[in-house]
């Protein structure tokens, strides 16, 4: 094959690069100047929004980080949170440049929402930018911290960002220890709820962002991280009583979960009934847990402490022996009718899942009745209306002979009392 003939090239010829291959120099300052100049010509929020949405010259994709610096802080942010000091004018519509007024801050957030909705690729950049800005919290004035908190709350309420960037603050030990983190998150919660969101919606967003009740506790300075202080803080802060109740409920649920696990461990270790009672009572008193809720968690903890035999006939005797051995512990937390009914319902729902125990449900109840742990009123209330709907027919059938016996015994007792009265 003949070699390919090379075409002559003129000396000094310059090869032109294709336009799409020419990379423009990254110039955030030029982007800022053009953006701020355009916004300065707008005399209201509507015109500012229109400028941002319709401007085709500004490269939002390349300069997304700079864009949100300008819309939130007013200018380009230097490391530490200060505005780059080159004498350039600031964005008068920025969240940190306007008043800390609720309506004004809402307008600033709506400006961001408008451009993010128009250019959807900016939403990811917005969350990343917020994560960066929140790390500069210590570099902002107290007033700007509260403005930033309002801005954050509105963007959360508008679902433009998740709660995940809030976790960045917990990495700043000085901000947490000084109480600045608590001031910030408190203002976020107040504004978020005032923006029309319910406590349930706020709680759901927090959970999805990885900010559970344990993380909320970490916003408090180290010497204030206890349930009583958190409860008092939310209760005493305007608009946050409902959030405080939610926090206590979450904290109590966690405590109950841990208590149930610890009871199972103690039972497996063979601790005495008295020690079980004392340790469970201490947790109950400290966290103000109702007796009925303790009764509800004791039963599954009790059942989880045994490795049950696979033969049903052996399991029955095994279960009766195990429960009888812990009747003192159970009885210590079933003094009220309410706790007794809750225990019966819990036993029913456990037996519904573990069918072997259905056959001895009435025997459990008789055992507790004879030990004065279950009263007639609680048993009859469970049978009449308080039972669970799970396996209702089977359990009521199982308990019917016991109920009949109770009613008969009650009638005989009333007859004896009437006879004694007549004799007198």
Image: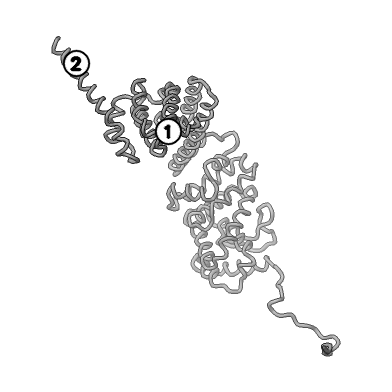
- Relative depth, front residue between 78 and 104: 78
Question: Residue 419: which quarter of the image?
Answer: top left
- Assign a secondary structure to mark 2: helix
Which quarter of the rendered picture does the N terminus lie within?
bottom right
- Judge whether residue 32 can be spotted in this image: no
- Assign a secondary structure to mark 1: helix
**What residue does disc 1 label?**
312
Q: Please tell me how crowded label 2 is: few (under 14), some (14-19), or many (20+) other residues with Cα within 10 Å.
A: few
Q: Residue at x 59, y 48 (%)?
A: 167
Q: Is residue 182 placed above or below 324 in the rendered structure?
A: below
Q: Given the current orientation, which residue lies at the most extreme top position?
A: 424
Question: Residue 215: which quarter of the image?
Answer: top right
User: Residue 350 location in percent, x, y?
Assistant: 41, 36
Give the left or right position of residue 363, taking residue 87 as reference.
left
- Relative depth, front residue between 116 and 424: 424
Cα separation, mark 1 vs mark 2, equals 42 Å
- Relative depth, front residue between 259 and 74: 259
Q: Is residue 378 placed above or below 193 in the rendered structure?
A: above
Q: Residue at x 57, y 59 (%)?
A: 94
- Judge whether residue 188 can be spotted in this image: yes
Q: Coloring scheme of the render? A: one colour
Q: Is residue 5 placed above or below 371 in the rendered structure?
A: below
First-in-chain label (1 vs 2): 1
Q: Please tell me how crowded label 1 is: few (under 14), some (14-19), or many (20+) other residues with Cα within 10 Å.
A: some
């Amino acid at each position: 094959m003949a070699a390919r003939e090379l075409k002559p090239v003129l000396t000094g010829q310059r090869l032109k690069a294709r336009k799409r291959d020419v990379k423009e120099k990254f110039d955030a300052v030029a982007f800022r100047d053009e953006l701020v100049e355009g916004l300065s010509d707008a005399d209201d929020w509507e015109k500012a929004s229109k400028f941002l949405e319709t401007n085709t010259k500004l490269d939002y994709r390349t300069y997304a980080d700079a864009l949100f610096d300008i819309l939130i802080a007013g200018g380009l942010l230097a490391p530490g949170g200060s505005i780059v000091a080159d004498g350039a004018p600031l964005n008068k519509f920025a969240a940190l440049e306007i008043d800390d007024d609720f309506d004004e801050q809402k307008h600033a957030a709506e400006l961001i929402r408008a451009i993010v909705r128009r250019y959807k690729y900016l939403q990811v950049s917005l969350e990343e930018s917020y994560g960066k800005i929140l790390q500069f919290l210590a570099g902002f004035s107290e007033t700007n911290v509260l403005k930033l908190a309002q801005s954050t709350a509105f963007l959360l309420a508008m679902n433009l960002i998740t709660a995940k960037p809030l976790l960045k603050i917990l990495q700043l030990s000085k901000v947490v220890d000084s109480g600045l983190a608590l001031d910030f998150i408190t203002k976020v919660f107040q504004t978020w709820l005032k923006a029309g969101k319910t406590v349930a919606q706020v709680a759901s967003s927090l959970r999805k962002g990885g900010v559970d009740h344990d993380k909320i506790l970490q916003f408090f300075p180290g010497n204030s991280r206890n349930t009583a202080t958190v409860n008092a803080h939310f209760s005493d802060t305007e608009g946050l009583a409902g959030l405080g109740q939610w926090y206590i409920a979450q904290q109590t649920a966690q405590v109950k979960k841990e208590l149930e696990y610890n009871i199972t461990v103690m039972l497996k270790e063979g601790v005495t009934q008295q020690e079980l009672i004392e340790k469970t009572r201490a947790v109950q008193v400290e966290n103000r847990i109702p007796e009925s809720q303790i009764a509800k968690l004791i039963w599954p903890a009790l059942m989880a402490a045994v490795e049950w035999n696979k033969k049903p006939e052996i399991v029955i005797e095994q279960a009766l022996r195990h429960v009888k051995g812990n009747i003192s512990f159970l009885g210590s937390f079933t003094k009220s009718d309410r706790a007794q009914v809750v225990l019966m319902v819990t036993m029913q729902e456990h037996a519904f899942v573990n069918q072997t125990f259905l056959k001895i449900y009435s025997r459990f109840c008789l055992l507790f009745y004879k030990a004065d742990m279950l009263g007639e009123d609680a048993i009859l209330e469970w049978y009449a209306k308080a039972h669970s709907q799970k396996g209702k027919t089977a359990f009521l059938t199982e308990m019917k002979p016991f109920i009949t016996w109770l009613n008969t015994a009650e009638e005989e007792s009333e007859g004896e009392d009437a006879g004694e009265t007549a004799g007198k």
